[in-house]
Amino acid sequence: MYIDRARVGVLITVSEDDLSQHLPCSPQRVGVELAQAIDAYAHKQALGYYPALEYFRNVDVLDKDLLDSAEQIAWLVSKLVREEVQKKLRPIFSTVQFETVQTQAFSMPPVRPNQKDALEKLTQFYTPNTIKLELILSMLRKDTDLAERKAEVYARKMIFRWLRDSFEHVEVTSSAEV
């Protein structure tokens, strides 16, 4: 018996329909309002980038209620994703550890103001329904042939197979043996 471990980065988007039963407001609507306000600010200030949402806690640009709504949605989405990932992956892996859980909207956007379709991409980015996870997964393996024991390949396949029906979008962004 061998214990193999893999570190896997996953990007998960929860559908608007799944969230509508838990939320009084639409994450998409919050994303649109955030993107419009931040885009206007970036152009007014002649910035070559869009700041992360945390920046706007100290700058009186965004409506406080809008930022609070984004945080509340992000908290709920993170909770739902963690519960579903744990439920789906626990039977497959010996352990499922969450190294990091971050709402994409609260990280630095890869979109730049001069990009084509910047506002559309920014809206998608700031919609607080996408979570970035970094998982440490361990599994008991019986095989002894080291050449065929690729924990990261197995983990990638199992994550996609077991989570794709639970979420709107599942993307494995990175993986490595631990």
Image (spheres, rainbow, N blue to C red):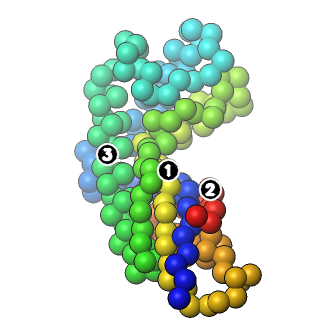
Q: Secondary structure at mark 3?
A: helix
Return the residue nearer the eye: 124 or 171.
171
Q: Are marks 2 and 1 in contact (CB under 8 Å)?
A: yes
Which numbered disc covers residue 75?
3
- Confirm whether residue 18 shows in the render: no
Which amino acid type is shown beneath numbered disc 1? Lys
Residue at image x 27%, y 57%? 21
Whether residue 41 sits left or right of residue 14 in the image: it is right
Distance in Å between CA atoms under marks 1 and 3: 13 Å
- The percent coordinates of residue 53 (x first, y second) are 44, 28
- Confirm whether residue 36 shows in the render: yes
Count numbered badges in the picture: 3
Q: Is residue 26 above or below residue 144?
A: above
Which numbered disc covers residue 173?
2
Distance in Å between CA atoms under marks 2 and 1: 9 Å
Outermost residue toward the top in this view: 45
Query: In the rendered structure, which disc, 2 or 1, sits on the residue that comes first in sequence?
Result: 1
Find residue 122 and report its image quarter: top right
Task: Give the class, few, some or many, for how many residues have Cα within 10 Å of label 2's Cα (few <14, many ≥20).
Answer: few
Q: Which residue is mark 1?
A: 132
Distance in Å between CA atoms under marks 2 and 3: 22 Å
Whether residue 44 sits left or right of residue 153 in the image: it is left
Q: Secondary structure at mark 2?
A: strand
